[in-house]
Amino acid sequence: MNANALLTRLRGQIPLLVTAVLLVSMFSVGSVQYDGFFSGQVVLNLLIDNAFLLVVAVGMTFVVLTGGIDLSVGAVVALSTMVSAWLVEQHGWPPLLVIPLVLLMGTAGGWLMGWIIHVFEIQPFIVTLAGMFLARGLCYTISVESISITDPQYTAMAQTRIPLGDLFVSPSALVALLVVAAGFVVLHYTRLGRNVYALGGSEQSALLMGLPVQRTKTTVYAISGFCSALGGVLLTFYMLSGYGLHAVGLELDAIAAVVIGGTLLTGGSGYVLGTLLGVLVLGLIQTVISFQGTLSSWWTRIVIGALLFVFIVLQRLITARRR
Amino acid sequence: MSAPMNTATAASPVKAVTRSRLFWPAVVLAVLLVANLAFTPDFFSVHLQGGHLYGSLIDILHFGAPLILVSLGMTLVIATGGIDLSVGSTVAISGALACLHISDSSDPGSLGTVLTAVGIALGTALVLGTVNGVLVARVGVQPIIATLILMVAGRGVAQLITDGQIITVTSDPFKLIGGGYWLTMPFAILLSALVVLAAVLLTRFTALGLLLESVGGNPVASRLVGIRAMRLVALVYVFSALCAALAGLMVSSNVSAADGNNAGLWIELDAILAVVLGGTSLNGGRFSIGGTVLGALIIQTLSTTVYTIGIPPETTLVFKAFVVISVCLIQSPVFRAKLAARGRRTRRSTRSHAAAPTNREVGA
């Protein structure tokens, strides 16, 4: 590899490097500034509190890599919590039946949206917007009120702590890490993964190369639907309730995590591990603000917006120079 | 011999009406309004009381006024092939700023205070719109993403301005904007009608509308023929932000309070829906302001209907989802081609069964 190619390769990694530096510096500043910040448990809590976001963001990474967008994720998460709570609490279904059913529902919904997007050539954001309306609306047809869960299996999942030496993690955090690992393997070591990158690079070329564009696109949205449903299941463990107003604005957090993680919004370039870093940055912002104590929670939104701004402009500068 | 001639001449104006872009939105609106009659028999009655007009129809116009304004701005943005997700946040910010200024001032009832408050809100919107416009037109960020930034951060800013509280104000001149009456009509209706009229005049009686459509149709070709596409696109986002700010003033004035959390929540989605319902293509390149106004009225009527019937209002979302997707399907050329192909196939098969009496139903 000559020096020039190496440089081009490195330039693509700039957002990822910036994110990594940001993460480390935020953590060190936090450790210097606040008592009790520098501990392994703070890091693990980032994973525990953001497990559902991490899972959803991994699904979003797949969609964004193909150059699409999925606005329905937050609503699908809410619908999953609602359906779980409804079937378990009000109909007495066993959780082991409900969870696969919810996952299947999310996957099927995502698949259907992907199918409509591809076959009828409608913009992804408007189709997933309709999906978002539908999912939130369905939540309210089940119940306008929040349904709390008292099922012993769910409460057990909520309270289980897996010890790691002096520290602990929740089962949800482990599930989220497993999803990240699975996403990594699929994107980098399977044919589907290569198709995803090819489709994001140029749909026209992918089509001319004879790649299964339709199957890849529908699969990607199905993956996002599955991840949203799984995120919903994890959120049900975390909140122990189903509610139509759960996860409002989660789609924005997920997109922010993906962008901050260095994935190009035009598709074709990015990493699942970057998304993991993006989620950790978002979590760290919240942690710092709660440690600070005097800052109100709405600062989280403003900081995330500012970060998004910086990273998007950075992306544009990089892609503009590449051309 | 004259009978077929008559039907032919009679058919062409009918066809002209049904082919009009406004026909289907108007039919939907009419059906919704008539359906309301079944639940509230005096739905269409408008009466004068104390010099003010009252009635369900007036209410729909009154409460729909902010949505009409926001949708108007959105229409022009979508005409250039963009989208503005930040309008909801702009609504919240402008309401919050205006209410903050009025509640902090020593004389909240004076006209000067209110005019300054309106000026502050519109000025801020100018800045916000410019930021969006520069990001889209100059930096070249996709419109969804560029406006997403302000959508996320804007809610936080609005809450920062109101300090997370609901600011209440008592000011008669301010109350006029969204809740007052002028010449028997609610002032909000007159204000939004004025803005809509101005927009129609600007886009349909000058070259501006044509230029917008050409930029939306093909930005590169427009630039090559010498249209300053960049400046036009930026301008459209500024206009959208200004419309949203006006809507924000109306919303906060109507309740005499600013709520950074809930003001204008989801209004961007309703506005997109109104634009789509009105027949403006999301791919850009053509727009219909009249259609958008009808679309906004359809949504407002739907909300009113749902409230009067007593269905939980949140479930309208399900209905909206189906409307969005079916309108988009109808707009999709691929879907139409498939439908037409299927229609042709069935028509051909019925023709082969020469005397099929069901011929009339084909193609419906």
Image: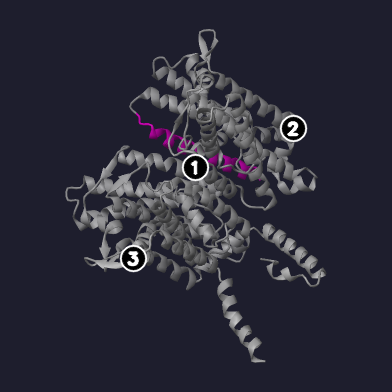
Under circle 3, the secondary element is helix
Q: Left or right: A175 with respect to B27? A: right
Chain letter behind tag 3: B
Q: CA distance from mark 3 to mark 2?
A: 68 Å
The residue where tag 3 is placed is B190
- Toward the viewer: B8 or B98? B8
Under circle 2, the secondary element is loop
* Segment colored magenta: A295-323
Visible residue check, residue A61: no
Mark 2: give few (<14), some (14-19) or many (20+) Cα within 10 Å.
few
The residue where tag 2 is placed is A2
Q: Left or right: B2 with respect to B98? A: right
Residue at 21 percent of width and 65 percent of height: B50
Residue, far top: A165
Q: CA distance from mark 1 to mark 3?
A: 37 Å
The residue where tag 1 is placed is A141
- Toward the viewer: B108 or A129? A129
